[in-house]
Image (tube, rainbow, N blue to C red):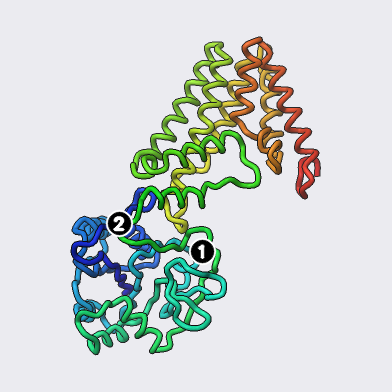
Amino acid sequence: MRVALIAVGEGGAAPWPEIAGRPLLLRQFDFARACGVERVIAYGNGAPEDAEALRNAAARAKIAFAAIASAHALVALVDWADELIVLQPGLVPEAASAIDAIREGERVLSFSAGAVRGGGLERIDAANMWSGALVLSGALVDRLEQLGDDADPHAALLRIALQAHLPLHQLPAAAMVDGSWTRTRPGADEAALNTARVRRLAGPGVARQPSRWAADWALARFSLPLTQRRFTVAAGVAVALILLGAGLVAGRNGWIAPAFVAIALAVPVLHLARLLERVRRAAFQPSRLPRWLGTLPDAALLIAGTLGIDGALHRQLFPPLVMLIALRLMPPVGQWRAAIADRALAALAIALAALGGAQEIAIMAWALLALAAGFATPEPGRLGR
């Protein structure tokens, strides 16, 4: 059986902060679950809300839970045949490579001392720094009885693991850079933690579409209130769906410009919902949002574009269909290509043209832009190859 040791802190200490709307201890719990634990042991007598949150999470996941206040109490809860996963206090473990390593059995997870500096990690030898996680057998846990009852079990178990010469497993230094493996402290500034996380996961890339830039800006500006509330992802998706639906209804009634404006507004809202979901979930957790959500703006553009052109169905369908095929085949390499590929920008351009009744011309013009950008793309696999 795999057992996880998670620290809830000392009495009177500040509670651990929330990381993107989820308490740090529950992020450790999520990691432990991904490693296959069947029992969680909370160590310490710190903030009651931390221990209660951990207890409730274990109950919902149908995982056995126990709370201890001393190192010796741990010995009675871990059998010789068990594997104990130790997670250092303040650790935010999200690297998928660490989960794979822990599943392989006894080892001490580390980082190369030359590749990683700072981050609150403890050096364990000349070449390695302890990552804050290890897994050892229940037989080694018995050695805690040789120490005082007031010993810190996390530090003691690290020394026991090193004295037993458990293998060291170096995690890639990229985990510290991309934020999938970090450390913090009790009472840390949640706003600063959220801002840092958003910057790592939603920072500017080489080229960003205007609608994605708007979503990035909104999340950076309102990161704390957006990440603290569970319903914000679902609310963002719902708002995007309402806007897309409103656009189709407007197009069906002949209000072409408002139809494309509604679609243009839906695109950054949908980007924001997907980005927010990425920030809230752990790096090792798959997205819960269906992939087909990303195709809805294209479907709305196709339908609204068809409704906005007079004539037989094949004449109505051809211009928006060519535009969308060209947009989907065009790699958004470079800032101007990214702008052309932006569905929100395309919808706004068509909406402006629709004010003068020139929506068909605008659709064909945007299709030509996308085709030209695709053929001009210097990368292998460009349109036309």
The answer to whether residue 103 shows anywhere in this view is no
Mark 1: few/some/many CA within 10 Å (<14, 14-19, 20+): some
Q: Quadrant of residue 107?
A: bottom left
Q: Which amino acid, by three-letter code, is at mark 1?
A: Ala
- Residue 263: horizontal and vertical position, in percent? 54, 25
Q: Which amino acid, by three-letter code, is at mark 2?
A: Gly
Q: Which mark is residue 187?
A: 2
Left or right: residue 92 versus residue 343 is left
- Residue 315: horizontal and vertical position, in percent? 71, 18
Mark 2: few/some/many CA within 10 Å (<14, 14-19, 20+): few
In the picture shown, does residue 9 fall above or below 313? Answer: below
Closer to the camera in the image, 238 or 203: 203
Question: CA separation, marks 2 and 1?
Answer: 24 Å
Q: Which residue is mark 1?
A: 175
Q: Quadrant of the N terminus?
A: bottom left
Identify which residue is drawn at 50% across, 67% down.
97
In the picture shown, does residue 59 fall above or below 348? Answer: below
- Residue 314: horizontal and vertical position, in percent? 69, 20
**Numbered disc 1: secondary structure:** helix
In the picture shown, does residue 21 fall above or below 9? Answer: above
Closer to the camera in the image, 271 or 111: 111
Closer to the camera in the image, 72 or 152: 152
Closer to viewer: mark 2 or mark 1: 2
